[in-house]
Image (cartoon, rainbow, N blue to C red):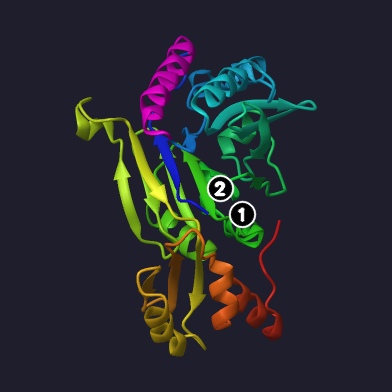
Amino acid sequence: MKPIRIVSISVTATIGKPQTFHSTLREAQRLALEAGRGSPDIIVFPELFAHGAYPESAWRRHAETVNGDTVSQFGKLAKKLGCMILCPILQKEEGRLYNSVVFISKQGKPISCYHKMAPTLGELDGGISPDRNIQVAETHLGRFGALLCFDLNFTEVSTALRNARPSIIFFASMFRGGLRLRYLALECACYVVGANATSNQLINPLGRLLNKAGTRQESFNMLPQYLEETINLNYGVYHLDYNMNVLRNLRNQYAGRIRLEVAQAEAVFLLESLDPKLPIEQLEREFKLERSLDYFDRARQRAGIVQPTF
């Protein structure tokens, strides 16, 4: 498993200004082509980066299907760049209106779609329907999840996503998320990539901020409006309980082929295999390592703790 390259782009229409819809699409494509010179595997855009131009009264009129013009345009772009694109849209489906993010394959085809599960009160008033099912995308690169903006405030949503076990969560949003975004990464034991209108973040599975970029107010238009980073998905997160005694043996036996990062206060550690020929599952079998989320689930079941659900 080779590391993958992520690009998270800051771009957004002016809210309530319909004339900025098409210009924002053009700007998003220009930035994607610029970032595409670095051969990314995945490009992600912020929540409703273009459809946010339309006022609430026009949402139903301008909503699109997953086979509509916006997804079609970015499908062609994905195929040209040879990478996946996560394209948020205002979506209509079977008479319902959704705030969605479409996963587009590197072949340019939509392969999965996540509908916002916790719309704001304003969105609900405007006709946006909440979904009740977490959709994760099974791709050639791994299992990926998504959250949209207000979703981040609800434990019920993050719990459903945690149970789906994605290796990356893409947070497309109109707000930055702050500490909640770091807690999401720690809670779900996976990487979180934030795509926001003004800034982007990469957070590791221990909840630690690895990179932040794309803040236009700080860049004075001289720096790129996107974050570029490489992520090693050959990893696992484990609790220190019952595993502390193997850390020294891991280091000694696989020196130079693994990377260990311990979050002592949280009592978990991140283990990465730096060798594409050494899958993390092999290390788990050899050292009898149980992933932290599985360990918590066993404890939860034994204690009779009921998880929050919709």
**Which residue is drawn at the image coordinates 42% and 65% (left, top)?**
206
Numbered disc 1: secondary structure: helix
Q: Are marks 1 and 2 in contact (CB under 8 Å)?
A: yes
* Amino acid on which the number 1 mark rests in the picture: Val
**Residue bearing mark 1:** 157
Instruction: Please name the residue that numbered disc 2 is placed on.
Output: 151
| SS label for mark 2 | helix
- Residue 14 appears in view: no
**Front-most of 31 and 94?**
31
Residue lying farthest top? 19
User: Magenta span has 29?
Assistant: yes
Mainly helix, strand or loop, the magenta region? helix
Q: Bounds of the magenta span?
A: 18-39
Question: Between disc 1 and disc 2, whose residue precedes?
Answer: 2
Mark 1: give few (<14), some (14-19) or many (20+) Cα within 10 Å: many
Q: Name the quarter where the C terminus is drawn.
A: bottom right
Q: Residues within 10 Å of mark 2 (few under 14, many from 20)?
A: some
